Image (cartoon, helix red, strand yellow):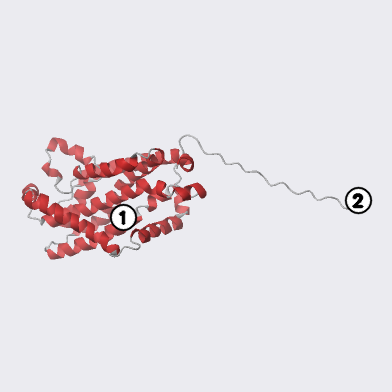
Amino acid sequence: MSALTDRSMPATATPRKPTILIYPHKGWQAIRLGEIWTNRDLLALMCLRDVTIRYKQAALGVLWAIIQPLTQMVVLNLVFGRFGGMSDRVKETIGIDVPYPIFLFSGLISWQFFASAVNAGSNSLVSNANMLRKVYIPRLILPLSSQGAPMADYALSMVVLAGMMVYYGTTFSITLLLLPLLVISTILASLSVGLILAALSVSYRDFKFVVPFLIQVWFYLTPVIYPIKMFPERYRWLLKLNPMAGPVEGFRAVILGTPVPWSSWAISTGVASVLVVLGLMYFSRVERRFADLI
């Protein structure tokens, strides 16, 4: 009976599901910036998440974005400006009587953005290890989104700087229109270092200790508390190779209304652009191993 039933009712074969095997690419890969544009909503969401988390449950909230650079400016002004005589030396070097607190703060807020962005970028992959292991997202989104919170602090610090300019009677010059370009140069500088350190930190956890030390040394090699003209002319080209030297000098020039240092700005931005390309190439080459190593 059962044999008759089997012959009268033809069996329906269950279609086999195709097996898809995904293999990681090997060697150098093309930089897939199109993926970042496709996932731009995710990038914006992660930037907003970082900004929200940064000051969550902090009693003073976003005021910390103002308190930190202001406190640092007051201490550096006392140590270098008053006791070290840097205030008078700056006036002699640039030939203009400028308030040293504004000279210092205008360089300091650009540096603070760079330092915070590099530190956040270098930790961006390791701190999101669980996400990397469980889901696929373009890995590049993580170091890019880490720039969001430092950028918010940077914007708040600029408001304080504008208030200081009014207090000290600093003239607002037309060169302030260059400010967006200088901000882009500063972002390029932070990305140039952050991308490379983010990829290296996955394989070598030593960079967790190296990055704070590196940033501390880098601070004194960047013309934040002194003008680049204080260095002997034959050594200035070395300082101009610093990706942050040009943006800091340029930012200060448009704030104080002094001549814009086009050459140092162009050299520093050129170095930063080359480093960004190299960082993207290295990141694309090693990102296939992140989920296994992290």
Callout 2 amino acid: Ser
User: 227 or 201: nearer the eye?
Assistant: 201
Q: Which residue is mark 2?
A: 2
Which labelled disc corresponds to residue 150? 1
Q: Is residue 149 visible?
A: yes
Q: Nearer the viewer, mark 1 or mark 2?
A: 2
Measuring 78% from the left and 48% from the top, which residue is drawn there?
13
Mark 1: few/some/many CA within 10 Å (<14, 14-19, 20+): many
Q: In the rendered view, tell whether residue 286 sits above or below residue 63.
A: above
The secondary element bearing badge 1 is classed as helix
Callout 1 amino acid: Pro
From the top left corner, tell me how far across and down residue 157 is, in percent. Answer: 24, 59
Q: Is residue 132 left or right of residue 274?
A: right
Measuring 34% from the left and 63% from the top, which residue is drawn there?
57
Measuring 5% from the left and 50% from the top, which residue is drawn there?
88
Measuring 39% from the left and 60% from the top, which residue is drawn there?
48
From the top left corner, tell me how far across and down residue 43 is, in percent. Answer: 42, 55
User: 97 or 45: nearer the eye?
Assistant: 45
Q: Quadrant of the C terminus?
A: top left
Q: Earlier in the sequence, mark 1 or mark 2?
A: 2
